[in-house]
Amino acid sequence: MLMKTGKLEFDQTFAKHVLKGLSGPRKSLPSRYFYDARGDRLFQSIMTSPEYYLTGCELEIFETHGDELARALMTDRSCELIELGSGDGLKTSLLLDALHEHHQDWVYRPVDISDHSLNLLEQRLIPGRPWLDFQAIHSNYMDLLREFEPGGARRVFMFLGSNLGNYTSRQAITFLRLIRAAMTPGDAFLVGLDLKKDPDVIRAAYNDAAGYTRDFNLNLLARINRELGGDFRLDSFEHVPDYDLATGVARSSLRSRIEQNVRVAALDRDFHFRKDETIHTEISQKYDEALIGELTSASGFVVAKSFVDSRNYFTDQVWVCA
Ligand code: AVJ
């Protein structure tokens, strides 16, 4: 929501989250604010960097097992494919094409808060697919899930790219229960999850040599500067990636190199940073069978089908109602 206050115009929700995140004894900022126009571009670069294996692994799964995946999702009833977060359309197009080959043309409903992403997706998917019924939903998917009533057309929800990993276990269970509540028996949930693996491989993925991940992380501070009149000096903060083997949590933080005060004009506040104090910005959970079992049983799902890439780095799974 944008508010006009004299000469300043800013997003009140963003401002509120920044105030809350920087006020406590352990500072943090929500990872969803990475994705402004510049953040979207940086994330695109991350996805093409050699260290960030997730995107390539999931694409390999869709390329290698697309047909089997389509078969696992098919029924004799028509269906809505509801993709939470619109993605770049490449993986989705492989699935839609595989379904079309089996004479199953489903309504495809990508859900995203970014009009821009939905338009890009439409331009990528429609050409060459006259049979495609593309019905974008411009919405926050948490809000949308709360509005779904069980019943109606058969639904397949899709949440790819290990986006679930940005949630803590508690948040993930809340989110999965929302999806489960929007489903009836016969519906399905297709989810992409990054698996636990050699810690060095994971550490490199969140610390690419070209520095895209660093810039992506620092973009949070740059965004506060741009949108809320902050005076963060970006070179006084360091990108700190970290991976904890025991929990499977990759965590990103920003560490203040010096003791300093940072002013945020829109909040009319100064924030004090001790030398080496950190701002926690993101977690990316890595999964194994035990963790997946905990999530599914806590949210009313069972794993019906599971695919992995050739290196066993990533999994795409079909979950159904328990
Ligand atoms: C889009 C949430 C899956 O956590 O791996 C990439 C975001 N952060 N590099 C991830 C991200 C740093 C990404 N997800």
Image: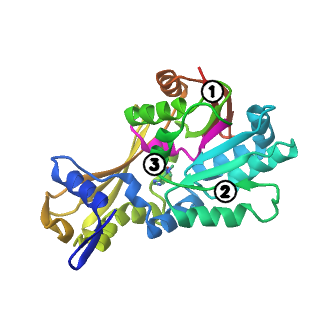
The percent coordinates of residue 285 (x first, y second) are 45, 39
Q: Alpha carbon of mark 3 to alpha carbon of mark 1: how far?
A: 32 Å
The magenta region covers 154-168
Q: Per the image, is 304 magenta? A: no
- Residue under label 3, please give it: 203
Question: Which residue is depicted at the point 39% across and 36% down?
Answer: 171
Say few, some or many: other residues with alpha carbon within 10 Å of mark 1 (under 14 / 14 to 19 / 20 or more): many
Q: Residues within 10 Å of mark 3 (few under 14, many from 20)?
A: some
Asked if ligand 1 lies within 8 A of label 3, the reply is no
- Mark 2 packing: few (<14 Cα in 10 Å), some, or many (20+)? some
Residue 199 or residue 106, whichever sits in front: 106
- Say if residue 320 shows up in the picture: yes
The secondary element bearing badge 2 is classed as: loop
Kind of element beneath mark 1: strand
* First reached walking from the N terminus: tag 3 or tag 1: 3
Return the residue at label 2.
89
- The residue pinned by badge 1 equals 320
